[in-house]
Image (cartoon, rainbow, N blue to C red):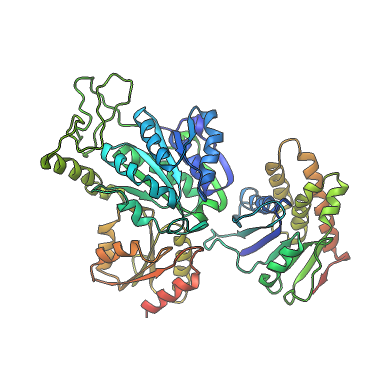
Amino acid sequence: MHADPKGVLTGLHFIDGDHAACEGAIAAGCRFAAGYPITPSTEVVERFAARIPLVGGVFIQMEDEIASSIAILGAAWAGHKVMTVTSGPGLSLMMEHIGYAAMTETPCVFVDVQRGGPSTGLPTLPAQADMMQVRWGSHGDYNVIALSPNSPQECFDLMIKAFNLAELYRTPVFFMMDEVVGHMTERVAIPRPEDIEVVPRRWTSRKPGDYRAYEPGEDLVPEMVKAGDGFRVHITGLTHDERGYPAMNPQAQDKLVRRLVDKIRKNAHKLVDVRGENLEDADVVVISYGITSRIAAAAVEEARAAGRKVGHLRLVIVWPFPEPLVAELASRVKAFVVPELNLGQMVREVERVVAGKAQVVSVPHAGGTVHQVEDILAKILEVAK
Amino acid sequence: MRTEIRVGGLGGQGVILCGMIIGKAASIFDGKHATLIQAFGPEARGSAASAQVTVADEPIGYPYVRRPDVLVVMSPDAYTTFVPTLKEGGSLLYESDLVVPDKRLPTGAKVLGVPATRLAEELGRRLVMNIVMVGFFTATTKLISYEAARKAVLDSVPRGTEELNLKAFEAGFAYGQRLVSGEDSRVA
């Protein structure tokens, strides 16, 4: 299915990542957003609020992030593609409803323009320190998808992918920007609507009476209906059976929760999106994501110019973590270097998957700015000796 | 090639828009790569404001400006804050009624002044001094083409103000051209 032409500003733009993310959402078909302003994410919804009435959608500024995150879930069950937009402190408040979205299998996108934390932290300065929070933040077992753009152009392109994945897997999808990517202005090329592929909701073809809200298809994802279409639907955060009704027993729990995890885990091979450079001959591989990947790329280039066999693996989809790919690299490289704007989060995933087969070196940074190219280069040269 | 530009001044002078137009001219209309970063903080009218623009032939990795090749200053405070970062042999473009370049300039710096506020006032509105500066920047640095800069101005200013802003652009451009043709430039 192609994008609705009404929402697509085809052409070249010089806009920041926040604005580009908003345009990506609209192009993807998002017609409802709720949010509460928070730096450095506010511009996403500011633009959405101005643009969406012209496209035929709704923005509501809610009283807080808790309300925003539940409002979008309601709108999703009314048939809309939805998102909310926030930064760390707001994301913390949304955790309850992230779990509810996972449990009720509500397609939705959470945009997190990361800033320095914990707590109020550094409102106007970058970090990448919410990476584990989006994976594990709400209680209970579930699985998520998270993408990490490194430019305004990718804020547009990957936002469409984020919405498409939310529809395909009926799970919360996290759009992990950071302050630099959000506030940096670059050229953004918006394609023609017929060149933008959007995934529609997986509406059921069954008739009311035949339909069971949580009966999974072959890929473990159930079909959906919307309020007002005449289907009898029960949606609850309680453990439920395939009809959607509460089922308080270990068998129902195992069946449901295992499926919530497995629908991502067993489809993980379809959810690999990485950019690899010079991996073929590499002794050392730098693994990075988001804004840090741009600094890492510059460091890798300098290291190669200095004669070191260094490759670069950039994670575009960060969750699920590309385990088989990293495991394969671990069998043939000497070391991994993992720079990130936190004191060591995704490096734990690298360590877990590498499992001692190669050296893993963290290049931590507490946030507030980006790494210097020299910091990453120094670590590369140290392990590439 | 990578060129780093810092534009500094006071909130309300149009510092960010000045940087925005330079970046837009380079990336949209000249087909190069450009990254604009605005200083975010408790900025308000009258306090310090600055924009960082990187222009390059290749995609830009590191996004911040560390040692600008070109420093554009519209206030004494911006001069004081940023002149220590100007690269040796770099260019200082300054509002010559507001800023007085001094010994703090790096060696070999090119120094190019323009009374942007006064030129804007002569056109009837002081508000367009930033666009005068864009014209002056275009003529003196040649980092962006005249055509691209002109289009970027038209593409960036509010509807109904195009004529005034184009006049401001032309005034700054003409002043800059006179300067670089050798009448009045000096090297620190």
> Total number of numbered labels?
0
User: Residue drawn 44% across and 56% down?
Assistant: A119
Q: Position of residue B174 (x, y in %)?
A: 84, 54
| Left or right of residue A167: residue B27 | right
Quarter of the image holding residue A324? bottom left
Residue B111, image quadrant: bottom right
Is residue A19 visible to us here?
Answer: no
Residue at horizontal 67%, vertical 54%? B19
Q: Residue at x 61, y 57 (%)?
A: B39
Q: Residue at x 28, y 47 (%)?
A: A270
Farthest residue, direction bottom: A385
Assign the N terminus of chain B to one quadrant of the image. Answer: bottom right
Give the quadrant of residue B155.
top right
Q: Quadrant of the C terminus of chain B?
A: bottom right
Residue B164 % position (x, y):
80, 42
Q: Can the viewer see residue A150 in this picture?
A: yes
Question: How far across and down, in percent of the image, does residue A214 sit?
Answer: 21, 33
Residue A327: where, in percent of width, then height? 25, 63
Residue B144 is left or right of residue A215, and the answer is: right
The answer to which of B17 and A179 lies nearer the viewer is A179
A361 and A301: which one is in front? A361
The relative height of residue A266 versus residue B87 in the rendered view (above or below) is above
Q: Is residue B178 left or right of residue A16?
A: right
A262 over A333 or under it: above or below: above
